[in-house]
Amino acid sequence: MYSEYKVINKQFIEKVLAENKNASRRFVELTESHIYGAIHVFGGLSQDEINDIFQTVFVKLFEDNKRRIRNWNQKSKFTTYLYRIVINIVKDYLGSSRFKQEMKNLSSLSDSNDDSSRDIEEILSQKDSDAFDLITLRMALIRLKPDELEVVQLYYFNGLKEREISEKLGKPINTISSLKNRAIKKIRKFMEEN
């Protein structure tokens, strides 16, 4: 009956909050890939840790009369709100010292002078980027084609110039520039939508 729901919207959440078992079951089905995806962004977790965090997320979502689900203000997609919940739970699980080290490693990536608003260059170069931006960026990177990802990694993470990447990969500089620009457009689109 609730399999027709492909996205989580206000009407669907109302059914979940109304204690409808079928809607709640479908809610779990629709959110599990988002939750696992957000957890996997944090590297170095064992499968047992991932499963514990996954279960903790659902306990937190459904405890206190589904308080966290009720607190969704609908200003963003529910999945965006869910990512923030997962991030906070993972941060708590990992403990502040490990999390701070992870963020330090991520935020010490390369610098860029592009003045576009809140895009990949800004997130990569800012030391104070919030965890949500960094996790969303990682999820966007995962979705790139292998050749696009390789160029982005060499350019932003290794600090190579397009000419150096061209020489290293044996591809024309125009191809490298196109791959980089295509990847940036995909990343920006993903970040805007999430």
Image (spheres, helix red, strand yellow):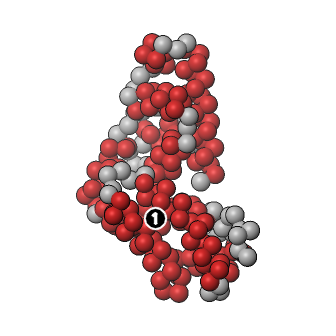
Residue 92 at x, y = what percent?
A: 34, 67
Front-lying residue, 8 or 122: 8
Residue 48 at x, y = what percent?
A: 33, 64
Residue lying farthest left?
97
Q: Image height check: is 147 above or below 28?
A: above
- The local secondary structure at tag 1 comes to helix
Q: Callout 1, which amino acid?
A: Val
Quarter occupied by the C terminus: bottom right
User: Which residue sits at x=52%, y=32%?
Assistant: 146
Front-lying residue, 55 or 123: 55
User: Which residue sits at x=63%, y=43%?
Assistant: 189
> Can residue 59 be seen from the camera position used here?
yes
Local packing at callout 1 (Cα closer than 10 Å; few below 14, some 14-19, many 20+) is many
User: Which residue sits at x=73%, y=76%?
Assistant: 1
Label 1 belongs to which residue? 86
> Can residue 114 be seen from the camera position used here?
no
Q: Image height check: is 172 above or below 85?
A: above
Front-lying residue, 167 or 81: 167
Residue 104 at x, y = what percent?
A: 32, 46
Residue 168 at x, y = what percent?
A: 42, 16
Count all numbered tags in the image, as a single digit: 1
User: Which residue sits at x=52%, y=14%?
Assistant: 171
Q: Image height check: is 167 above or below 96?
A: above
